Amino acid sequence: MSKKTTVTTRPDGGNRLLKASSPYLRQHAQNPVDWYPWGEEAFSRARKEDRLVFLSIGYATCHWCHVMAHESFEDQTVGELLNRDYIAIKVDREERPDIDQVYMEIAQRFRGGGGWPLTIIMTADGMPIFTATYIPRDSRHGSIGMKELLPLVAQRWREDPATLRGSGAEIIASMSAKNSGAAALDASILQQADRTLHNDYDPHLGGFGPPPRFPRPHLLSYLLQRGQRTGDEQQLAMVEHTLDAMRQGGIYDQIGFGFHRYSTDARWLVPHFEKMLYDQAGLARTYLEAYAATGHQRFAETAQEIFTYLLREMRDPDGGFHSAEDADAEGVEGKYYVWEQAEIETLLGSEAELFCRVYAVEPAGNYREEVAGHGAGGNILHLPLPIADIAAETGIDQSELEARLAAGRDILLQQRAKRVHPLVDDKLLTAWNGMALSAFALAGYLLQQPRDLAVAREVAELLLNKFRRNDGRLLRCLPHGETAIPAFSEDYAALANGLLDLYQATQDVRWLQESITIAGALLELFIDEKDGGLFDSATDAERLILRTKTRFDGASAAAGSVALRLFVQLYRLTGDARWHQGAHDMLRGVEMQVRSYPQGFCALLAGFDLLVGESEELVIAEGKNSAALLEAARRTWHPCRTLIVKRADNAALLSRIAPFTAAYPVAERAQAWLCRGGTCLPPVDDPVALRRVLLGR
């Protein structure tokens, strides 16, 4: 077992964060800072004592959050300055994305950029007067440090509070202005996006745009869908190249599997070593989609490796998945993951030479630690060449080579487990577990893996049973004591979408019913009826200085983008017009943003393509030969197709949910009906004929 990092304890036992639900907040429980969690107690004291609020937002596996914490928040002098003049509040951005989104947008307006740790100095009523990200303890290289900044701002607040408030008020007023009268999207935006992504593509190294390079699974999924939709083989080739480059690169954990958060370089070699659940879920699904589009087994194998990592390292006893693993171990980024050549030689003996050749291990190392800035002699394992090329180059049979490498990886994995393990943020978040549910469900269907379907069902049961209140409202994460954070639009959208994917994989109508229920709540609680899209927080949520609406697809798809695809599919499955209207509502008011930067809205554009492109609905009424028809459908899976399997035992329920299915009879011999682009074809009862029809796009 890996060793656990210890934390120095305060003589008084800790501050108010000691009993917080968030691992990130608990990381700061021993600081000399008199931290408050977000809440009325902190703001009430700030108002009563006319103090400014020092708001620090981060998350448990944030590398630079650790750096700032060690430099500043563990420093006695900084703690005294904060405690003297400010009310200090800590927020976990993953628990409270609403607070993070509000103040991140403000920071971007103030300073033209943002990131974590996010630092906001504001008034007791939430009006920002200063924003920053990482701040060093001491001033250096022209950047002000905490020890100088804190007394300076406090003095200015005492002397001239009106001027400080004025700058913040102007920013808030500009952000509150509505953009009305925006044009509607039309199909030309898809061609524009295709051209933009083609121009951004790196034909030599794979990926899009300059480094740092993030995996961006929704961008790759968009291109896969468009390539299959249009027959553009170049789009598929760009995705294949990028997926292969990432899998062979240092951004992929070659020993324990799973993807690190991003690559700092264009070659996918040097990652930021943090591992996020949403990346694993999104990328597993994209690799599965690539497998379905190309038939290449290596993509399915990569998805299964990601699942191996999740089930081994990130599974919670309750059945869900933890949020993230830190980049740091023993205060050093990447220490857990890199290898010295001598260590590999000791562990692998006569196999070391081949292993080091395949994984490009260098005597002097290939990794330069980011903060310390010096060569540490460590190697980031990666594959400069595909295994097939190395087999040809060495004359070793490929199957033998793969077996020898797997044996070496197992030895290194066992040795690595003895190291001090990076911190695991063990929060269970509804949105990210909904994404994992979706990925496992698709794997269970495409690969016919009973284990994966079982995992998907377990996650679904957990979220529905423990993350849902008696009144039906969802929670962001498991309640901790009296703390129960209401879910946000991304939670509702991701869970409803995951449940719909589980329905498509199992044809258990219960999951369709649950998806419809949660999608209905999503519309009721979050829709912006005036300007379109989804607000981040519900109509009855805590009122912040702004009510934000995230439309940009960042590291994971925005709630409105997920909801767009969800609503289109529900409309095609049920015929209920409210889903059709909901889909169009997701597109209102976003046209200018999409046209100015289409690569930032790929998940939204995939949903738009689904809405305006040729639809495909397949209904199979079960009979003696239904297994063969279902297999034909599975082997020709397409992201733009919906599937309904009607059986004698679900016919009545399906007829209530999807009235049009009443017209399809369940008989002794199974039949399949395909409707494409609003035109329904004659039924077929032969799997060869069905396969031919499904492939006849």
Image: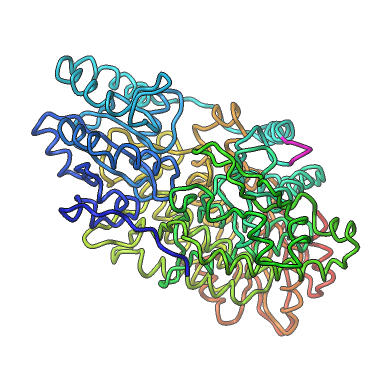
Q: Residue at x 70, y 71 (%)?
A: 407
Residue 661, relative to residue 196: is it above or below?
A: below
Please give the range of residues in magenta.
Answer: 201-205
Q: Is residue 57 left or right of residue 460?
A: left
Q: Is residue 277 left or right of residue 144?
A: right
Q: Main secondary structure of the magenta part?
A: loop
Most foreground residue, 91 or 192: 91
Q: Residue at x 80, y 44 (%)?
A: 232
Please identify the quarter of the rendering in which residue 83 is found: top left
Q: How is the image coloured?
A: rainbow
Residue 508, relative to residue 239: is it above or below?
A: below
Q: Residue at x 49, y 50 (%)?
A: 327
Q: Is residue 139 left or right of residue 664?
A: left
Please identify the quarter of the rendering in which residue 543 is found: top left
Residue 491, relative to residue 102: is it above or below?
A: below
Q: Is residue 138 left or right of residue 384?
A: left
In the image, residue 324 lies at what x, y percent? 47, 55
In the image, residue 358 lies at what x, y percent? 77, 56
Please identify the quarter of the rendering in which residue 468 is found: bottom left
Q: Is residue 110 visible?
A: no
Most foreground residue, 239 or 16: 16
Q: Is residue 356 visible?
A: yes
Most foreground residue, 494 or 671: 494
Disc count in the image?
Answer: 0
Q: Residue at x 42, y 54 (%)?
A: 491
Residue 257 in the magenta stretch? The answer is no
**Residue most extreme to the left:** 48
In the image, residue 445 lies at what x, y percent? 65, 69
In the image, residue 569 lies at what x, y percent? 58, 55
